[in-house]
Image (cartoon, helix red, strand yellow):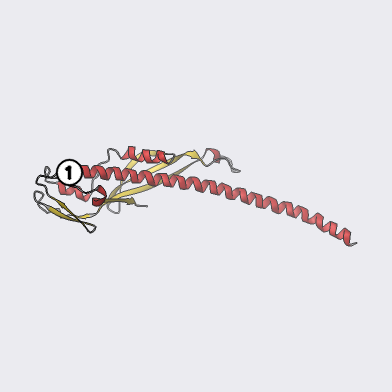
């Protein structure tokens, strides 16, 4: 009697076991799909961040080059220290190079923007790779996308009313920078990172 009952219980448990196993397997596969998608999104965001920073850094370097050329020859050279209108001839190429290093492609170039009163660049990227095959149809051809904004922010306190023909002392986040327009040599300027910071805005 007890033997028959035990066999019947076993017959009921087996379908339940198969059902639970199927649920766990599906949950594991679903988790894998989400992990694939998250990995692709993270890769795209890293590429966008790097590309936006590269565009802003390239513009910052060109900005400082223009500053060096203006000191002693252009009465408006102090305006360059505000960073309001950074040139960006090489921003697109710099953004694309960094995106490519992260296996992604810039979409639409590095776009000049203003965030919190500071100029910068917005870059959108698409990964060259896809999410990959999964139990969800279509993921094998789906690329991840992301965007980022990097801004250029002056580090120095600038008195725009100062005499552009006389030596100027700047306080750049606690570091003193002296610029003498008389006999000025562009090599006398400090590194661009001393005059301007570059960082992600969002």
Q: Residue at left 81%, top 56%?
A: 10
Image x and y of residue 16, in percent: 74, 55
Query: What is the number of callouts on the image?
Result: 1
- Farthest residue, direction right: 1
- 22 relative position to 198: left or right: right
Please tell me which residue lies in front, 96 or 112: 96
Q: Residue at left 74%, top 54%?
A: 17
Image x and y of residue 104, in percent: 43, 39
Dot 1: element: helix
Q: Which residue is mark 1?
A: 186
- In the figure, 91 relative to 11: above or below? above
Please tell me which residue lies in front, 76 or 169: 169
Image x and y of residue 187, in percent: 18, 44
Image x and y of residue 120, in percent: 30, 47
- In the figure, 13 relative to 76: above or below? below
The quarter holding residue 7 reads bottom right
The quarter holding residue 9 reads bottom right
């Amino acid at each position: 009697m007890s033997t028959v009952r035990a066999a019947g219980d076993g017959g009921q448990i087996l379908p339940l076991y198969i059902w639970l196993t199927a649920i766990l397997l599906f949950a594991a596969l679903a988790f894998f799909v989400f992990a694939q998608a998250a990995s692709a999104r993270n890769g795209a965001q890293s590429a966008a961040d790097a590309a936006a920073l590269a565009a802003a850094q390239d513009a910052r370097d060109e900005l400082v080059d223009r500053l060096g050329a203006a000191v002693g020859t252009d009465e408006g050279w102090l305006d360059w220290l505000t960073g309001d209108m950074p040139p960006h001839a090489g921003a697109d190429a710099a953004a694309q190079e960094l995106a490519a290093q992260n296996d992604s492609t810039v979409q639409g170039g590095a776009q000049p923007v203003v965030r919190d009163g500071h100029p910068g660049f917005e870059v959108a990227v698409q990964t060259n790779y896809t999410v990959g095959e999964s139990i969800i149809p279509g993921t094998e051809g789906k690329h991840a996308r992301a965007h980022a904004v990097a801004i250029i922010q002056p580090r120095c306190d600038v008195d725009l009313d100062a005499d552009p023909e006389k030596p100027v002392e700047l306080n750049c986040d606690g570091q003193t920078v002296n610029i003498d327009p008389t006999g000025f040599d562009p090599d006398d300027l400090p590194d661009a990172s001393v005059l301007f910071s570059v960082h992600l805005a969002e």
